[in-house]
Image: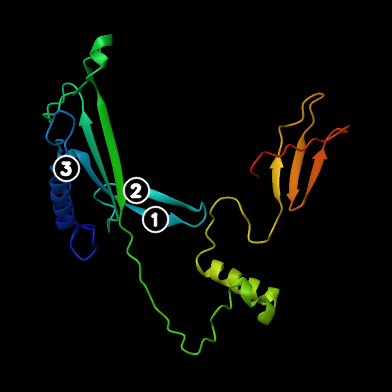
């Protein structure tokens, strides 16, 4: 929450570093009351943006990438670190095997994405349920699908997983064909199954697991 864009970058960095140090003081770290944080080394600022071409977020790290909406904090328990009083983590059971300490580190990334929220009160109910499947009987399937597709497009056509907007049967693709081993695709069609093979099959067995 310190990454607000209403302040200048220097103030944001200072406030965020104080917040990180205050938070780490609240949590025990092995044999230490709290982990030691070097705010100039262990706290990194940056910016993340959505790439519509790759359908992924792009992270850019450094003080120059403003306005900040990304912060990364690293904690360390390592040997010979002149900037930290936290030495390697002492172990309880491992000394039996000759290991008294362990070098460990952890990294956490948090993002702050402000959003504009608009509330529309449809007192006439003219827009109610027009994009729900229950409206097919009133508007028809093509109208409901058109409304759903428009909503999906207005949201930037986000991609989650590999499902497409147009309905398709679930297909499981087999290994590549090799010698006497065929390539087989299995398509699940609700109450039936379609099997496609690069070689002729003498029989197809369907195994039904208990509980399904």
Q: Tell me the colour scheme of the image.
A: rainbow
On the image, which quarter does residue 95 sit in?
Answer: top left
Q: x, y (%) of residue 173? A: 71, 40
Q: CA distance from mark 3 to mark 1?
A: 28 Å
Query: Circle 3: is it few (<14), some (14-19), or many (20+) Cα within 10 Å?
Result: some
On the image, which quarter does residue 147 sit in?
Answer: bottom right
Pick the front one: 111 or 192: 192
> Image quadrant for the N terminus?
bottom left
Q: x, y (%) of residue 71? A: 27, 49
Residue found at x 36% / y 53%: 48
Tell me whether the residue at label 2 lies in contact with that at label 1, contact meaning CB atoms closer than 8 angstroms. Answer: yes
Q: CA distance from mark 3 to mark 2?
A: 25 Å
Q: CA distance from mark 2 to mark 1?
A: 8 Å
Mark 2 sits on what residue?
60
Which of the two discs, 3 and 1, labels the residue nearer the N terminus? Answer: 3
Residue found at x 43% / y 51%: 57
**Against 109, is 166 above or below?**
below
Which of the two discs, 2 and 1, labels the residue nearer the N terminus? Answer: 1
- The residue mark sitting in front, 3 or 2, is 3
Tell me whether the residue at label 3 lies in contact with that at label 2, contact meaning CB atoms closer than 8 angstroms. Answer: no
**Against 28, is 94 above or below?**
above
> Image quadrant for the C terminus?
top right
Query: Circle 2: is it few (<14), some (14-19), or many (20+) Cα within 10 Å?
Result: some
Residue 51 appears left or right of 104: right
Mark 3 sits on what residue?
24
Residue 171 appears left or right of 101: right
**Against 3, is 59 above or below?**
above
């Amino acid at each position: 929450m310190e990454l607000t864009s209403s302040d200048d970058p220097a103030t944001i960095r200072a406030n965020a570093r104080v917040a990180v140090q205050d938070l780490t003081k609240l949590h025990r770290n092995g044999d230490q009351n709290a982990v030691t944080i070097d705010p100039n080394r262990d706290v990194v600022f940056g910016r993340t943006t959505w790439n519509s071409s790759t359908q992924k977020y792009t992270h850019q790290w450094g003080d120059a990438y403003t306005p900040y909406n990304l912060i990364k904090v690293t904690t360390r328990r390592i040997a010979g670190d002149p900037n930290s009083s936290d030495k390697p983590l002492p172990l309880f059971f491992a000394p039996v095997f000759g290991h008294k300490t362990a070098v460990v580190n952890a990294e956490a990334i948090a993002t702050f994405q402000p959003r504009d929220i608009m509330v529309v009160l449809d007192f006439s109910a003219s827009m109610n349920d027009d994009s729900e499947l229950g409206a097919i009987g009133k508007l028809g399937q093509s109208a409901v699908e058109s409304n759903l597709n428009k909503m999906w497009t207005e949201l930037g056509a986000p991609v989650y997983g590999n499902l497409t907007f147009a309905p398709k049967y679930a297909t499981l693709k087999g290994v590549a064909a090799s010698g006497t081993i065929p390539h087989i695709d299995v398509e699940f069609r609700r109450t039936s199954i379609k099997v496609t093979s690069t070689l002729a099959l003498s029989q197809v067995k369907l195994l039904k697991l208990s509980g399904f």
